[in-house]
Image: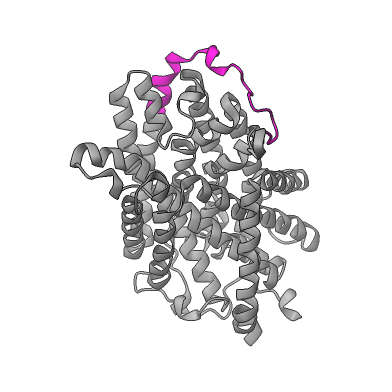
Amino acid sequence: MSFLTRKKSMDLAGVGEAQRLKPTLSWPHLLALGVGGIIGTGILTLIGVGAGKAGPAVILSFAIAGLICACAALAYAEMATMIPTSGSAYTYSYVVLGEALAWVIGWSLILEYSLVVSAVAVGWSGYAAPLLEAWAGVPMSLMRGPELGGIVNLPAIFIIAVVAGLLIIGTKESATLNAILVVVKTIALAVFVAVALPYFSADNLEPFMPFGFPKSGEAGAEVGVMAAAAIIFFAFYGFDAIATAAEETKNPSRDLSIGIVGSMLLCVIIYMGVAVAAVGALSYTQFSNSPEPLALIMRQLQQPGVATFLAATAVIALPTVILAFFYGQSRIFFVMARDGLLPESLAKVSSRGSPVRITIFTAVIVAVIAGLIPLEEIAALANAGTLAAFVAVSVCMLVLRVRAPEMERKFRTPLAWPVGIAAILGCTYLFFSLPTQTQFYFLVWNVLGVLVYLAYGMRKSRLAKA
């Protein structure tokens, strides 16, 4: 039963050079990676889904989800500076809680990152498809998944292939391009707020909470402020991808906390501004569940030029989210393979320091998901994996505060116990606010994961061999 308790060390002891990632990133790269990962489909697309569940109170949903994510981000910052190796929540769990729980968290992270990349690719397609049809005459049937009457979502598959190619070329090069696109995306949101705010009307906020606070509704429909928060929680995470870059950071003890906490605070401010401008400028009933809600709002306000600008910007800049999470997914896969829980042959880096094999493997998986599965179902299931990881990181932080209070902490979470407990309870509540079907699928996914671990990882892990 040693697999329940065996833990790996905090450093890279026993890892050969062929399996080590090269440190090439500094704090501006990490800050851009975080902002690029956070600002994306959540605000550009899922604000419409959230408004359909909560009405104007989607503003409150954003605030609740942001507060819970902020607590988790502080826990991540402390753990990342203490354990500056790749793997994020999976690695922290392996060091603190043991191999068995680490596998469950790693398996949940695989779900999170794979589905986020797929969901954002589908969201990108929602903006790209109308432009391609208008400008290039591409039939819409070739650009929509089965849920919208098409066959396969080809634009989503295409953008995944492009991002995979960038990551194969090199980490620093793709991070630099990401930083440029993040600036473009931030400018676009600022333009939306500036144009929408003059149209703000208090009448659009009535009734403010049409579906109540907790999930409720007729015929089992799960709506309300918390139901919306559980879905648009998707809009806030992305900072956890920074933690997967720890091993590739030049000065992790300083740069990781700047990237994680800085990107989270910046994005909360941006999101609140966009949410207020959106629901104040137009009745939520007119843009709820739209695949391109911000562009739709601009068209309804007779601002077609701004709508086209937003749609074009989304097409250009949404790939930054795909890049951030694709990067995180490939690193999770890489570290799990390096630990022996997945085939070690996948844990090889190229001469440029990129894990090419695992990147291609990841691209195939997420392309299949993006081509065939609807956006809302992807986002909800991705949230379940993320919430599990956030709980694990918060637990790890509190366990180390008891087990190793003397350890050096380059970043110390203020009010660690209240913050950690708030993150754990908040994430747990959001998990149970997800659709029941999503919770069931998450359970099935983890039962499958346990079977994979018992059949392979338990015997093949590096610690088992040792």
- Magenta stretch: includes residue 214: yes
Report whether residue 5 is seen.
no
The scheme the figure's colours follow is one colour
Give the residue at x 57% y 81%.
Answer: 14
Q: Residue furthest right?
A: 402
In the image: residue 4, left or right of residue 258: right
**Which region is colored magenta?**
190-216
Looking at the rendered structure, the number of numbered marks drawn on it comes to: 0
**Residue 119: image location, x then y, percent:** 46, 49
**Vertical arrangement, residue 340 with respect to residue 48, above or below:** below
- Magenta stretch: includes residue 425: no
**Residue 172: image location, x then y, percent:** 37, 58
Give the residue at x 61% y 18%.
Answer: 207
Residue 18 in which image quadrant: bottom left
Q: Residue furthest front?
A: 219
**Residue 140: image location, x then y, percent:** 28, 43
**Vertical arrangement, residue 445 with respect to residue 410, above or below:** below
**Vertical arrangement, residue 280 with respect to residue 139, above or below:** above
Give the residue at x 75% y 55%.
Answer: 398
Residue 361 in which image quadrant: bottom left
In the image: residue 256, left or right of residue 453: left
Which is nearer the eye, 204 or 10?
204
Report whether residue 58 is seen.
yes
